[in-house]
Image: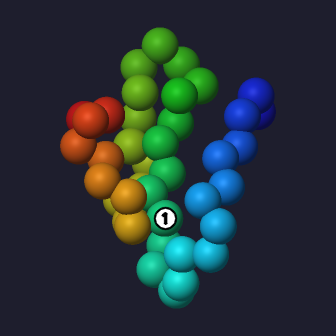
Amino acid sequence: MDVILNGGYLGQQPTTVIDFSDDEVVVARVGAGDPTPFQ
């Protein structure tokens, strides 16, 4: 893992997880963040 972004406390709602490990970006989980730019 090259980068971890910490947005601070976001409450009890799960965060959005986006996988950049390959050439194709994969939205692994949709949660508090808007994944639209990566879909």
As drawn, the residue found furthest toward the front would be 8
Q: Is residue 36 left or right of residue 28?
A: left
As drawn, the residue found furthest toward the bottom would be 12
Q: Residue 2: x percent and y percent?
A: 76, 28
Q: Against 2, is 27 above or below?
A: below
Residue under the image location 62 percent in, 75 percent down: 9
Residue ID for mark 1:
15
Element marked by disc 1: loop
Q: Is residue 2 left or right of residue 38?
A: right
As drawn, the residue found furthest toward the top would be 23
Q: Nearer the viewer, residue 33 or 22?
A: 33
Quadrant of image for the C terminus:
top left
Residue under the image location 49 percent in, 73 percent down: 14
Q: How is the image coloured?
A: rainbow
Residue under the image location 30 percent in, 53 percent down: 34
Q: Nearer the viewer, residue 23 or 11?
A: 11
Q: Residue 22: x percent and y percent?
A: 54, 19
Q: Is residue 1 left or right of residue 7?
A: right
Count of numbered labels shown in the rendering: 1
Q: Against 2, is 15 above or below?
A: below
Binning the other alpha carbons within 10 Å of mark 1 as few (below 14), some (14 to 19) or many (20 upward) gives: some
Q: Is residue 22 left or right of residue 16?
A: right
Q: Residue 16: x percent and y percent?
A: 44, 57
Residue under the image location 65 percent in, 47 percent down: 5
Give, as a three-letter code, the residue at label 1: Thr
Quadrant of image for the N terminus:
top right
As drawn, the residue found furthest toward the right would be 1
